[in-house]
Amino acid sequence: MGEQLRFGLVGGGEGAFIGQVHRMAAELDGLARLVCGAFSSEPEKSRRSGSGIYLLPPARCYGSYAEMFRTEQALPPDERMDFVIVATPNHIHFPVATAALEAGMHVMCDKPVTFSLAEALTLKEKVAQSGLTFGLTHNYTGYPMVKEARELVAAGALGNVRRVSCEYMQGWLATEQSGNKQADWRTDPARSGVAGCFGDIGSHAENLVEYITGLDIEELCADLTTFVPGRRLEDDGNVLLRFSGGAKGVISASQIASGRENDLSIQVYGELGGLSWAQTEPNSLNLYWPDRSQEIRRTGVNTGASATDATRLPAGHPEGYLEAFADLYRNFYAAIADDVAAVGFPTIDDGVRGMRFIEQVVSSSKDGGVWLKM
């Protein structure tokens, strides 16, 4: 890869958390640097965040994303941003991504990809028409041992997959969180969309399940619950799954699991064996066999090609969330530089599937847990 890419950030201003995570991950390998941003819907707050948090020159701290794209477009090619990171509440994803594509800029977007499935389908058309690179930050797919699990399943090491279980437990919304900026928009249907917990973390579980198994969810049956009084979106739920090929599964997601932090785990069982992985111990992949002892594979120790490529440090040096996040960005940059079909990171197609999953989960639960096609 030649010169560093330059990127802008939409969102991530005062009180946000994911904007700084994006910035660190995007810059981790030294392949790109933040040059501008529109960090809040409030112009003064945006400019203050840009200079105070991100240490950018005032001229590159914009009052709105529309101003940013317009001004950046007018700059010389060797100065203006090459791509934008969209790190806003869900209802802003579509207009920002659309404006970026129309301005000729590549896009890396937070999940879920849009506010609704209809927007996601429209955005897919716009991405195809633009010829630009579009990425989606389902960052858990960047972990080396998640990639190892995917390779093992694809190689037939477990035989035909029979059962998949994925659990994503958080406890930070177990009580009312009035005044918490992160809680406010995630529990507001006007900004989050039709789902709360399943739009936020259930969508990660869906993506991880399909990524590791290589199977498509064909049907689902959902039971969602809102436990905290007065909350307008669900904060807990369970979804039964039927996959292509006959496998069955379940996704459980909750944000009211008191005391749980960010506990994402997955188990896959086939005819010949099984595996499990958990984000709380991300450098280990557990393998289970009917005729021999349990096996533990470790990051950096005789792993397959994709896991080895995603590993940055020698074995025994912990790698975690930021490195997994950065793996998506590194592959995104390669796609931009080589002008090839996107590989190694989630794309708009994953975003469309994720939005379809979210809306079908909500519809199934509202109708009393009926089975619906994906």
Image (tube, rainbow, N blue to C red):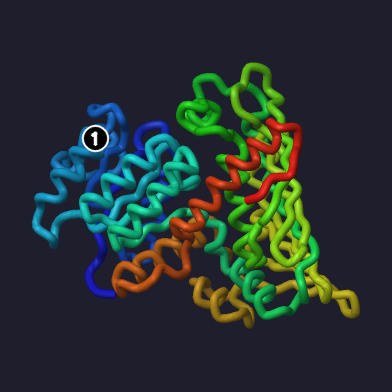
Label 1 SS: loop
Position of the N terminus, as image quadrant, is bottom left
Indicate left or right for 315 with 342 as reference.
right
Kindly identify the residue that appears in the image at 45 percent across and 38 percent down. 90
Q: Position of residue 266 (x, y in %)?
A: 71, 57
Q: How many marks?
A: 1
The relative height of residue 334 versus residue 240 in the rendered view (above or below) is below
Kindly identify the residue that appears in the image at 35 percent across and 36 percent down. 13
Residue 137 appears anywhere in the view: yes
Quarter-of-image position of residue 213: bottom right
Q: Which residue is outermost to the top? A: 230
Residue 259 appears anywhere in the view: no
Q: Amino acid at mark 1?
A: Ser
Kindly identify the residue that appears in the image at 75 percent across and 32 percent down. 368
Q: Position of residue 258 (x, y in %)?
A: 72, 33
Looking at the picture, tell me which residue is in the foreground, 309 or 74. Answer: 74
Q: Position of residue 153 (x, y in %)?
A: 69, 73
The relative height of residue 147 versus residue 279 in the rendered view (above or below) is below
Indicate left or right for 46 with 204 as reference.
left
Indicate left or right for 270 with 46 as reference.
right
Quarter-of-image position of residue 26: bottom left
The relative height of residue 137 versus residue 191 in the rendered view (above or below) is below
Kindly identify the residue that appears in the image at 44 percent across and 56 percent down. 348
Give the residue pinned by disc 1.
64
Q: Position of residue 275 (x, y in %)?
A: 75, 67
The relative height of residue 324 versus residue 152 in the rendered view (above or below) is above
* Neighbourhood count class around disc 1 (C-alpha, 10 Å): few under 14, some 14–19, many 20 upward: many
